[in-house]
Amino acid sequence: MSRDPVARGARQSRTGISDLWQAWWQHHRTSASDSLGRLADTPLQTLMTALVVAIALALPATLLLALENLRQLGDRWDSKPQMTVFLHKQVQAAAIEGFQAQLRQMVGVSSVEYISPERALREFQAQSGFSEAIAALDVNPLPPAVVVTPTAEAIAPERFEQLRQQIAASPLVDDISVDMEWVRRLNAIMTFGRQLVLGFAALLGIGVLFVIGNTIRLEIESRREEIVVIKLVGGTNGFVRRPFLYTGFWYGVIGGLLACLLVSVGVASLAEAVRQLAASYQSTFELQGLGLTGCALLIICCVTLGLLGAWLTVGRHLSAIEPR
Amino acid sequence: MIEFHNVSKRYPNGYEALAGVTFDVGEGEMVFLTGHSGAGKSTLMKLIMLIERPSQGQVVVGGHNLNRLRSSQIPFHRRQVGVVFQNHQLLFDRSVFDNVALPLQIAGYPHREIGRRVRAALDKVGLLDHERANPITLSGGEQQRVGIARAVVNKPPVLLADEPTGNLDPDLAADIMRLFSEFNQVGVTVLIASHDWSLIRSVGARVLTLEHGQLIHDGALV
């Protein structure tokens, strides 16, 4: 039957488009507040479900945050790959001068910096915290070294390796240490870690869908009578679905806020320890929290999962409830 | 207003509830539907409300062939048919007012209009001073009247009632019947399933009698 009033019989009332729009909007508002009210009626149960959502998302969020912090730590070196060329201790100053000139001629070398054993010892003394032990030494154990910074083109792994072998060929060279190696490995590990965490997050997300779905299924069961009556007096599926979707939405919002809180508390409790650890390495590194964007993303994820869980469950169970 | 053309209903378990039923209830008519329990009265009502679909034949309500309605159109059909249930089907988690307001909220009436119409309907059934009460605190007769108010609040052209006086004493039953007559007088097509013979006789309307799913009588009660 159409929505048009039937021609005769009892006087039919008309509901205009703007009335329908207002009523639709009104029902959204009442559904949202009713759903929230129902959740508030059973605070403990609501908190438990929201906490499951929060923990399930706070875990991968924390791991991603940890990886992000590691990446930032890596970035501090990432931009300037260098190699430190250690020379034999017996090499004379004149030979070192010549070696430096030779290095500067090489293709792929951007700059060369000589670090004398004395300078190295001073810096080591100042930074390492072993100053007293070092002061007790009779002879300077440190070899002369040259720090070579490659040009932008020579940063590529193969060119870099070529350059390293070229320099290592010199009889003056004892050893070459490449600062970059661990950064590269770290990056590889983090790419792997990131994928691992995302896979882990996907699994937990599916878990959240089931938890929300199950909670909503129980609510549908307890409101079966109401659903039947609404269908009997002409309620559409959308009308029936709406309050349950809002329930899922609110679980998402509360779970998301709790997840932000959990992660933030975790970051705050670690921040001081990390700062001290960084300070002992002469670093000003500070632990990065979620930030506003991170919190927003986390809440959006939770809300999406909440809505999706509700949608899937409601779709599956509502069709089974028909007036008989 | 309500037409049945050779309608049969066989349930999946093989039980044949209606067999070749044909009748036509005109607009603004008031008709009683009688028969023993199991004769097919409830099934007939369910076919009109599209809770069930016929196995065979056509049901036409308000000029619309119900066989041609898609499931998505069923809610809009049900808004044209007010139903009073024997067991009231009231919701005890909300007030009398909210129970009666439900069809209007669903149909998307504006807020002020809902208040006005709900109070008019409650006034009609004599329960205006109970609008804030929970229906569970009301007597059986009062609950039935709340059900009637909900069935007529959006002024449907068709009103169905399934044993509306089943659990009421004779005085209350007569009151309820008077209400249905009043709705009928303003043009509503009314179909009442009942086996309260004395009451039917007192109203003196047309009677359809079902037996084992077949229509065995159509006319005034003899």
Image (cartoon, rainbow, N blue to C red):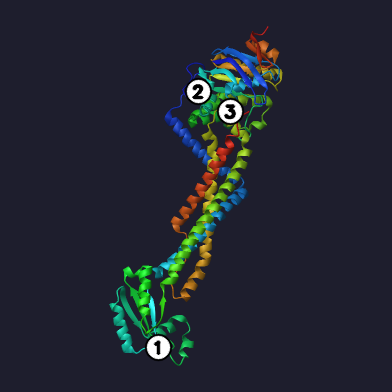
As helix, strand or loop, the secondary structure at mark 2 comes to loop
Say left or right for A73 vs A208: left
How far separated are the C-alphas under marks 3 and 1? 95 Å
Q: Tell me the kind of residue under disc 1.
A: Lys
**Which residue is at the far top?**
B222
Q: Is residue A22 visible?
A: yes
Specify the subunit that label 2 lies on: A
Q: Is residue A33 visible?
A: no
Give whichever of discs 3 and 1 has the lower sequence position.
1
**Measuring 55% from the left and 12% from the top, which residue is drawn there?**
B26
Question: Could you tell me which quadrant the C terminus of chain B lies in?
Answer: top right
Residue A213 in the image, given as x and y percentages of width and height? 58, 44
For label 2, the residue is A1
The total of numbered circles placed on residues is: 3
Please check whether the numbered discs 3 and 1 fall on a single chain.
yes
2 or 3: mark nearer the eye: 2
Please check whether the numbered discs 2 and 3 fall on a single chain.
yes
How far separated are the C-alphas under marks 1 and 2? 99 Å
For label 1, the residue is A89
Say left or right for A219 vs A120: right
Crowd tier of the residue under label 2, counting other residues whose Cα lies within 10 Å: few below 14, some 14–19, many 20 or above: many
